[in-house]
Image: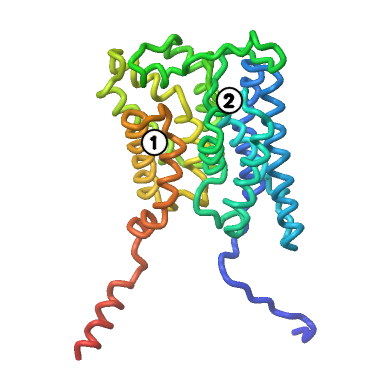
Amino acid sequence: MDSNKTLTLSPSPHVKHKNNTQAVMRDVLIALTPAFIWSIVIYGWMAAVLTVLSVALCVFYEFAYQKLTKKPITVSDCSAAITGMLIAFNLPVTTAPWVLIFGCFFAIVIVKQLFGGIGKNIVNPAIAARIFMFVSWPGQLSHFPKGYYNPFVSADAVSSATPLTALKGGAVPETSVLESFFGQIGGSLGEISALLLLAGGAYLIIRRVITWHIPVAFIATVAVFAFFFPQAGVSGLTSMGYHVFSGGLILGAIFMATDYTTSPVTPVGRLIFGVGCGLLTVMIRYLGAYPEGASFAIMIMNLLVWYIDRITMPRVFGQRKEKKAKEGGEAK
């Protein structure tokens, strides 16, 4: 045996997988691209401007913070880009660009980096930023133009009540459930096409980036309650269609509630998490002052993930026997 050779020991696991963080985030970007393109078709070039600006700001903030604190630069993993895209998807196209300066800073620096970076944050950064911006500048996030929007031509900025707003006020929405499904309604950039978001979710499930548990449990819970408790005198089926295909339910259930860091690790835990998100969404939509509740519901459930994991994690093999043996020794 050659004495110059060294034996290197390292802890498990030793199996390497090609799906690193960058590959996973790249798949998420691909899944979001159809909805991004459709938002440009519906709202025009301002949709692209807001999305690109949001992504650029998030990447810049992460790079600058890590550079100033002399930490490893991780912007190449694309997680900051995903956060930026999701922040833009949660905003109406009429949002002033300066709002993103504060929103993206809050998401990347306050929610993500100050907690230790990727994998350490306790709530989803994009959702936290969305709620922060809504609380700080509610007027900016409450105006939803219908169709193409040109910020230099006021005639194009025709405001239209979203289906959820109409139902909340006891009125039948102007748009049909089918229009909501295909994305021919007013709303945030990422809320206008349930079809394309569902297609992106199917892609992520096929690629095994996410599992079906949280999206199905989340959406099904809202659908069941909307069916049995319709609003504005519409049929149960129509109510279910509006509540599922309008607002941020599909976007939140597929792309934000499934965040690895802020969701449970066990299948049972994910089902509990999804049902909890659905129940809270329905409660906020029906009983709260705001017609949408998906973002608030997800952030609340993010804070309960540790407890869900604790009660759903399988027992370590032999743990009960060791505990009994210890108790028996103390009794003697």
Q: Amino acid at mark 2?
A: Pro
Q: Residue at x 60, y 36 (%)?
A: 87
Q: For the residue marked with disc 1, what is the amino acid? A: Phe
Residue 218, which numbered label? 1
Mark 2 or mark 1: whose residue is earlier in sequence: 2
Is residue 330 something one can see in this rendering?
Answer: yes
Q: Measuring from the top left, give residue 263's x and y in whole percent.
A: 46, 49
Confirm or deny contact between disc 2 and disc 1 (CB under 8 A): no
Q: Residue at x 36, y 29 (%)?
A: 285
Which part of the image, by quadrant, shows the C terminus?
A: bottom left
Instruction: Give percent across and percent down for residue 90.
Output: 56, 32
Q: Nearer the viewer, residue 38 or 53?
A: 53
Q: Classify 319 as above or below 308.
A: below
In this rendering, position of residue 138 left or right of residue 322 = right
Q: Real-space Cα distance between discs 2 and 1?
A: 24 Å
As drawn, the label of residue 92 is 2
